[in-house]
Amino acid sequence: MAGQANRPAAMMRLAALAGMLALPAAAQTVPTASSADAPICTDRPTKSNFACTVPSGLVQIEADAFSWISTRAGGARVDQLLFSNPTIKFGLSSRSDIQLNWVPYTRVRRRDAAGTPTTQAGTGDVTLRYKHRLTAADGTFQLALLPFVKLPTAPAGIGNRRVEAGIAAPMNISVPGGWTITLGPQLDVLADSDGRGHHGGITGLFNVAKQFGAFTLYNELWTSQNFDPAGTVRQYSYDVSLAWLARPTLQLDIGANIGLNRDTPDLVAYLGVSSRF
């Protein structure tokens, strides 16, 4: 009788212990919140954007410490080095922020099929972005709108000297167990290759991220369809990266984007750092 009487109490203690053990796993999730007390939430690594915004009045910097882009085609090779690629963000409200991206210095080395090299260096284009989150900051599903415009500040040969624009709609779905699924549909207005006008393009991605303590592993499939009148350019890549949340306002990352067809750069490798102030 005494054993039977103690059984409910023992079961309650076991249930409480199981609940305590389950709490850390349930709490682990890829950062997606926009509040000041939440861990930093970034639009990197990989090519995906998150629906989160920078908390009102705060500044956030997300940058490549170093990035290398390598492309080979028809015996020719192009290597581009980006010496930082910062995006500076400022929180306008609890749901929106404004962003500026600019490459202060980049170096492009081209080698033709005969092996003759040429080198060009200069600044990159400026991209202005505005993000507005449409859903609650703590919801398991988040959606934002992200219009942007690219200003042609890069010299010819590094940029195309044309204004381009677009709008993205990043979506995040938080799944129990520290998983987050991200979708990134995007419409683009791109300059014609002959410089005479503009045409449309679409970009899409599917990203699956898994958190392991302070580390998050990202796996992503990305595509861009450029409907240039001179001929459609289709790009595909597999992107993988690892981020480390060194502290709630500091993230370090490393990653690589691997081209899956000849119209996509063969490899993009980078190191990155993000911080919120």
Image (tube, rainbow, N blue to C red):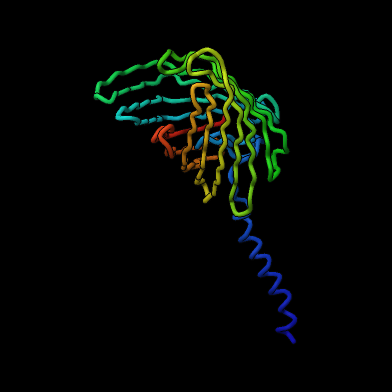
The answer to which of 146 and 7 lies nearer the viewer is: 146
The answer to which of 107 and 193 lies nearer the viewer is: 193
Q: Position of residue 267 (x, y in %)?
A: 39, 35
Quarter that holds the C terminus:
top right
| Displayed quadrant of residue 96 | top right
Give the residue furthest to the left: 115
Please tell me which residue is depicted at 64% across the width and 33% down the height of the picture. 169
Give the residue furthest to the front: 230
Quarter that holds the N terminus:
bottom right
Horizontal side, residue 208 vs residue 138: left or right: left
The answer to which of 255 and 264 lies nearer the viewer is: 264
Please tell me which residue is depicted at 55% across the width and 46% down the height of the picture. 208
Horizontal side, residue 244 vs residue 72: left or right: right
| Displayed quadrant of residue 147 | top right
Q: Position of residue 150 (x, y in %)?
A: 55, 19
Q: Position of residue 42 (x, y in %)?
A: 56, 35
Q: Indicate whether 17 appears above or below 198.
A: below
Q: Position of residue 53 (x, y in %)?
A: 64, 32
Q: Is residue 129 visible?
A: no
Q: Indicate whether 66 appears above or below 156.
A: below
